[in-house]
Image: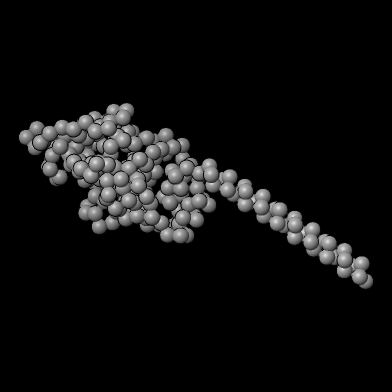
Amino acid sequence: MRWDRFFEDLEDQLDSEWEAERAALDTEAERLRLSRIPLRDRLVALAGSGGRVPEITADLRDGTVLAGAVTRVGADWMALSVPGAGTAPVWLVPSEGISTLVLRAEDVLATARDANPGGTLGQRMMFGFVLRDLVRRRIPVTVHLTSGRVLSGTIDRAGADHLDIAVHEIGAVRRADQITGYRLIPLGAVAAVRLDAVVDLI
């Protein structure tokens, strides 16, 4: 009888050790998986979270704080829909313009768990590509620079690493008599671009 109990104890001990080893391996595999997730994939998880659209708060490098929902994610940018921001609540935020993102605890966990790169078009769509679409459509914008300066106008050109903006008042039509100046802005200096007209993104 004592021998039976002895072997049962050994079996229990062995089972416990196997469980502990398997848990350690699972934990290490999860750490390795998490170490490979870029921020972009977590933003894709926020944008594609099914029926519920989580709200986040984005602190930008210029000090602007935006509260809204991620609606699109490109290769190096996100579109944020900000309620109560007037008739055109869409902001384009390059990844370099983000200082921090504030999420609820369940969304932090969900984005880590459900992170994925999304569609191939989104993975290839760079910030400059979206700006060139705004050029084509002549969409008025307000550009927030990382220095804290804000410029409103119309983007005339978007190059590989910069944009040209014709500066004019918000709501004014881009005409020669309305333009107060021109600026060339390196894309690295852009914290965000607010669309000052209603537009469907690509």
Determine if residue 154 is in view: yes
Q: Residue furthest top?
A: 160
- Which image quarter holds the N terminus? bottom right
**Which quarter of the rendered picture does the C terminus lie within?**
top left
In this rendering, is residue 158 above or below 98?
Answer: above
| Left or right of 31, for residue 59 | left
The quadrant holding residue 197 is top left
Residue 69 placed where, x, y %? 36, 53
| Left or right of residue 23, residue 144 in this image | left
What is the tally of numbered marks visible in this picture? 0
**Residue that appears at 38% across and 51% down:** 101
Percent of width and height locating residue 34? 54, 47
- x and y percentages locating residue 132 in the rendered image: 29, 33
Residue at 62% x, 48% y is: 28
Q: Quadrant of residue 52?
A: bottom left
* Residue at the image position 72 percent from the left and 57 percent from the top: 19
